[in-house]
Amino acid sequence: MATSHGTGSDSVPESQTMKSENETVSSEDETEEESDDSEEDQEPKLRYDRVSNDLKKILEKDCASCMAVHAKFLALGTHWGAIHILDYLGYNIKGKEYPAHTCTVNQISVDDNGDYIASCSDDGKVRITGLYESDHDQIVNFDRPVKSVALDPNFNNHRFVTGDDKLILNERGFLTRHKMTTIHQGEGPIRTIKWKGDLIAWSNSYGVQVYDMSSRSRITSISKDHNYRPDLHNCNLHWKDERTLLIGWADTVKVCLVKERKEQDVRDLPPKYVEIIAMFNTPEYMVCGIASLDSNLVLLTYDKPTQPETVQSISSRPNLRIVDPHLNYYEEVSNDALTIRGYQNYRCNDYHLENVVEDNLFYIISPKDVVVARPRDQDDHVAWLLEHEEFEQALEAASLFSKELKKHTYYDIGRSFLNYLLENGRFEDAARLCVKVFGKNKDYWEAEAYVFAKLGQLKSLAPFLPRSDPQLSPAIYEMVLNDFLQTDAKVFLQLIKEWPHTLYQVQTIISALIDRMDRDRNNRALLQALAELHGFKKEFDKALAIYIKLKHPDVFKLINRHSLYEAVSDRIVQLMEFDKDNAVKMLIDNIGKIPVEKVVRQLERNPEFLYVYLDRLASTDQQLVTPYSGNMVKLYAEFNQAKLLPFLRSSIPYPLDMALKVVEERSLRPEQVFLLGRMGNIKQALQLITDELRDVDQAIEFCKEHNDQELWEDLIQHSLNKPNFIRGLLNNIGTHVDPSNLIKRIQTGMEIPGLRDSLVKILQDYNLQISLREGCKKILVADSYGLMNRLVKTQKKAISVETSHVCQLCQERILVTDTHRASDITVFFCSHAVHDLCLIGSTDNCPICSTQRRGPGSGGMFAK
């Protein structure tokens, strides 16, 4: 069973709020350690306030004996026989206080409208008082102690019941005379009566009875099921509604439901009956009062004494419990121990529980104290969370139920959470929370910035400071920047980059930065920050100078962003020294602003930089490097010889003599061979290949490239004393030179490795050539024969001439019916037809197609 215990103290101070002077009632002593940790962490279901003000003064002189509650007021009866009409705050309602009896008031009853009050006492009188009119005030003297009284909920009919040793119905009879009717008697004193709708419930020494006024019959009798004395343990009755009766008596609780009989019984039973739908015992405590809260029960309980009641002992605190009833058991939802004034001296019958159903208010009455309990609202929930330092949950509740909160605001809760985090040194969490709590409130942000500054924790706040909506005063941002300037140069630089420079006075930061750099002139982070700040002021020349000094890659971003090409046109070497790639890219992308001539002039003293620039420029546009092609030959020869030969083979013009001299100086033979060949010195180039490179394959390829018979003869001549060359020639020249010329010149007895294989390969190549020729011949003959047959068949075909055809020369009809106008015609294979008389000269070719140059149309004709 879930339980919850509050905390409290014996002396509870009065609330100081203007709205209510009620005292707050704690539900358990702080020094009591009976509940375990899990119970202490459980939030109570109810909130408790002590009704104070005028009531406190009344109870200082008198003692409460009973109370009736209504949605409009409280009616308190005392041991001196007085009745006080109070509001919910405990103030006397003016003119509503009067001495009703000469001894203790036993019970008070109020009608549903709150217009009449009835009270009874041991003085034998029942007093009925109209609160708003006195025409119907009356005092009924019974000449014996009256223990209980209940007004008809609708008192316009002036009915009420009283209880002593019998239950008497009082009503107006004939001619408005007072009429008394005994409803029940003979079962002991009747100490409690509750009237709801047409149903009257009362208790006596044997149990609880229910009477139906509509049928004027008793419908049930419920036994008490215990042996406790009724005078020491009163029966507590409460109508949850017009059909549900709650009974709490000693250590027994019953929930009864009044139902209608569906069929009339032959035994003439009442039309209604009562069914007990839940019943359970409470072995650890006695029930002092009972009420309902939604589907649960509210029980005011008193712990059973551990010693006989004859022994003088100190009583424990009463408890207000919320339980979920079932048929034979219950589940405890919450359990709050109450610190009532003087509880040490009270017994079970000294406590009473009254309920204002409309407002879910529960009044706990003791002789010297009255406490009101009510379901906790969102303000109470938030207050409990704050008390237990559950700030995040409190903020969430404030966000979800902002309209229901009256005592707390989201900001106040957040402010408390912030203070808690700061006190516990959780500065980053506190800074993060500022975003939620302060939102767009500029004043809150600025005030909190000074709090963090005082604690020396601006570093924690900086990442969360708003930069827009709201934008804070420049002094706040300058204060944060100055803090980082003095303590962390890297973060200072980061903030300078991230924060818009409009947030602060740039010149103020520059001045502070310069003062700081007097102690550390070579700090790269500070220098870079200074360059950024100069850029914000559009002092790009100063910023550029710092970036170049730092050799920082952002120098190119600065140049490109602000088109500072003229400013760097004289510092190209410096740019190339720390980032050749980006420098060359910038120079090539902006040739129109930094001419090639100017770049080359500055880089001439540094050949490597010049090579990088011209090489990249050549890959972009070869025309731009044409004036510097001679320089490029030298640069390739020095820095990248692998690219020299491709450059020499390219279409870029360059001085051949200079190029040949460069490659000769560096003994670059392949390049030298290419240049000699390009200059026409092919024999010298071949000699260089054979004598120095000794590369027969290259020599053969060189000869194939130039396809010169004299060159081939020179190669053969150079190879006669070189067996490897002979073998290479035998393997590769079969298609260019007759191998027999070489074979005949081979000296007798010369040892040539792989000669047999080479000869076999020559023979195979020869056979292959013969086979290919024969195959080609066969294919040619077959194709020629096929084409000839096709031509013959085509020429043998007839050509259709229709009557609509006309001569292409005279435009007269070809076919006529008049024999006198008939003429021979010639039809060409292109389908053109003409009169023979119209033809002039040769008739082998179609004159129309020949004139239009449409291709073959002759090749014979068809005459008809």
Image (tube, rainbow, N blue to C red):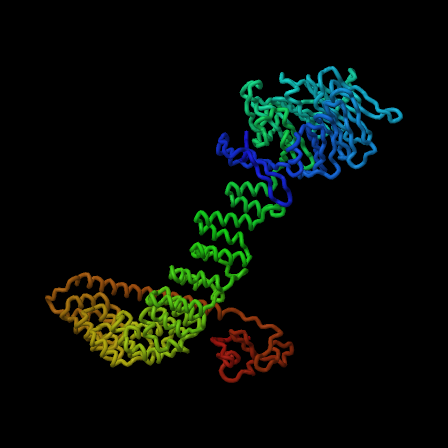
Quadrant (top left, top right, bottom left, bottom right) of the N terminus: top right
In the picture shown, does residue 87 fall above or below 200? Answer: below
Apparent side of residue 675 relative to residue 436 in the rendered image (left or right): left
Q: Position of residue 423 (x, y in %)?
A: 46, 48
Q: Position of residue 52 (x, y in %)?
A: 64, 37
Q: Position of residue 511 (x, y in %)?
A: 41, 69
Q: Is residue 615 visible?
A: no
In the picture shown, does residue 342 fall above or below 550? Answer: above
Apparent side of residue 838 relative to residue 585 in the rendered image (left or right): right
Looking at the image, the residue that sits furthest to the right is 175
- The residue closer to the viewer here, 396 or 743, is 396
- The residue closer to the viewer here, 353 or 208, is 353
* Quarter where residue 633 is shown: bottom left
Quadrant (top left, top right, bottom left, bottom right) of the C terminus: bottom right
- The residue closer to the viewer here, 139 or 211, is 139
- The residue closer to the viewer here, 597 or 271, is 271
Q: Position of residue 841 (x, y in %)?
A: 50, 84
Looking at the image, the residue that sits furthest to the left is 749
**How many labels were placed on the picture?**
0
Apparent side of residue 718 relative to residue 55 in the rendered image (left or right): left
Q: Is residue 847 visible?
A: yes
Looking at the image, the residue that sits furthest to the bottom is 840
